Image (spheres, rainbow, N blue to C red):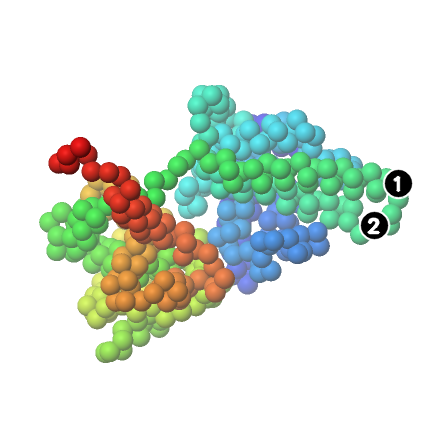
Amino acid sequence: MMELGASVKVNLYRDTNNHSFPLVIRNSVFPACLYLNAFLNGNHNSPISKGRKGVSTQAPSLNTRIKYAYELKLLYCYFADKGINLVDRVADGEFLSRVEVEDFVRACKLYADDSDSQESSSVVSISDKRIRDAIHATANSHSQVSAHTFRQRLIRLRSYIEYLYVCHHYDQADTVYKAKTDDKFRAFQLYINKFISGARKDNTITKDPFESVISTDKFFELLEIIKESSPKNPFKSSKLRNQIIMQILIDTGVRVGAVLKLKISDLVDDWDNPRFLITRTPDDAADARRMPAANKTKALSVTVSSDLMKLIKLYVSTVRASHSSAHKHDFVFISEKGVSSGQPISYKAIHKLVDKFGDAVGTKLHPHKLRHKWNEIFTDKAEEAGYDAAQIEDMRKYSMGWVEESKMAQTYNEFKLAVNVQKLSAKNQSKSVPSLGGASE
């Protein structure tokens, strides 16, 4: 069990094959728990998880494992602070009591870990007085995390306990002791599943479906200030690179990972159909970044305008070519100053530039909002072109790189659906409500 004052954080390392992996470490050196880290980087499809709805058959990506790492860090720190060693508990055939589960549920709702920037190596301990104060201050106000985050934290605890159960008790010969252990394990599963299921209905944040992710006036203002030539451009340097990155995010709807992974060899400068390829190359040996780029969606070809392709080629042949370190790799976008000059640009850098453009137009902006906005515009343009709903959904799935059974189209199109429902409702109401003026009785 770790000391209450010990520092626990998430670090990224590379193995002998140059593959990145996260570890939850203690005192900047030692793994916080061997079981915890084995679970984090191992096969998450345990025998008792097979057949469970929503369980993927694929190994988690690096980005997913990093997200898991922060969730595991939180539960490790929480239980260590309570003097509870989960490994010993499960090995002894004991699990968490109702009260212990309920206490963890409350903590998950109120405690927000500092994992917003995965580039950061800042240390956050559950025993830190500031966090205790924050939990106390918000205990009677509102939850500090979304229902999705809350639910994921509970799922991570359940999955980790299941992993420990498999390590210590699964597939053993039947005995009276094993039967009692199995009963306690199933009781734990049933009890925590109640909170996981209820989390879907427990979101304190209500999103207005009529509210566009970026208002029309702010969006058109953004389109102007991202231009290298704009007097309102908030950057003093790297203007061409920043403009191209923003245009790719706005014009194509791809994720940041796809932009980071983009290589010169992925550019197809076809006169009639300029495009670039989004590849699926996990653990790319050529990517030396601390946080390697990852493409979450399936591989696909992304069409861009001729003007945008010209800007990309101009950037590659001028700005990028002027950095000697850039000749050692094939990634398109590079850092242009400092010790990392010529090296592939990072996630943190792209998030910062998007955030700065948002500040310049007076709106909170992050890359995924641009993806949502692309979907809004895509729906409008497709309807104008005469495509029906089924065709629009198929085209959207291809453009976004989603698998066939994906339900993401519904999520991205809530705004358009709400507008259509409102129009229909208003039309029906105008027929049913009597005129209040100009009529004689």
Pick the residue in front: 246 or 124: 246
Q: CA distance from mark 2 to mark 1?
A: 12 Å
**View extreme (bottom): residue:** 271
Q: Amino acid at mark 2?
A: Gln
- Reply above or below: 280 against 32: below
Check disc 1 and give the amino acid type: Val
* Residue 441 left/right relative to 68: left
The crowd level at tag 1 (other Cα within 10 Å; few <14, some 14-19, many 20+) is few
Residue topped by disc 1: 176
Give residue 150's position: percent from left, percent from top: 52, 38
Q: Tell me the quarter of the image containing the N terminus.
A: top right
| Percent coordinates x, y for residue 417 in the rendering | 34, 51
- What residue is pinned by disc 2? 172
Q: Nearer the viewer, mark 2 or mark 1?
A: 1
**Residue drawn at x 68%, y 29% as measured from the top left:** 98
Q: Is residue 371 left or right of residue 2?
A: left
Q: Residue at x 30, y 69 (%)?
A: 303
Q: Is residue 171 left or right of residue 225?
A: right
Residue that lies at the very extreme toward the front in this rendered image: 441
Q: Above or below — where is 89 with respect to 232?
A: above
Q: Is residue 249 visible?
A: no
Q: Quadrant of the C terminus?
A: top left
Q: Residue at x 19, y 53 (%)?
A: 223
Q: Secondary structure at mark 2?
A: loop
Mark 2 neighbour class, 10 Å CA radius: few under 14, some 14 to 19, many 20 or more: few
Out of 53 and 272, give the one closest to the viewer: 53
Residue 195 lies, in percent from the top left, at: 59, 36
Residue 437 spot, x, y in % from top left:
15, 34
Q: Quadrant of residue 400?
A: bottom left
Q: Is residue 136 visible?
A: yes
Q: Residue at x 59, y 43 (%)?
A: 156
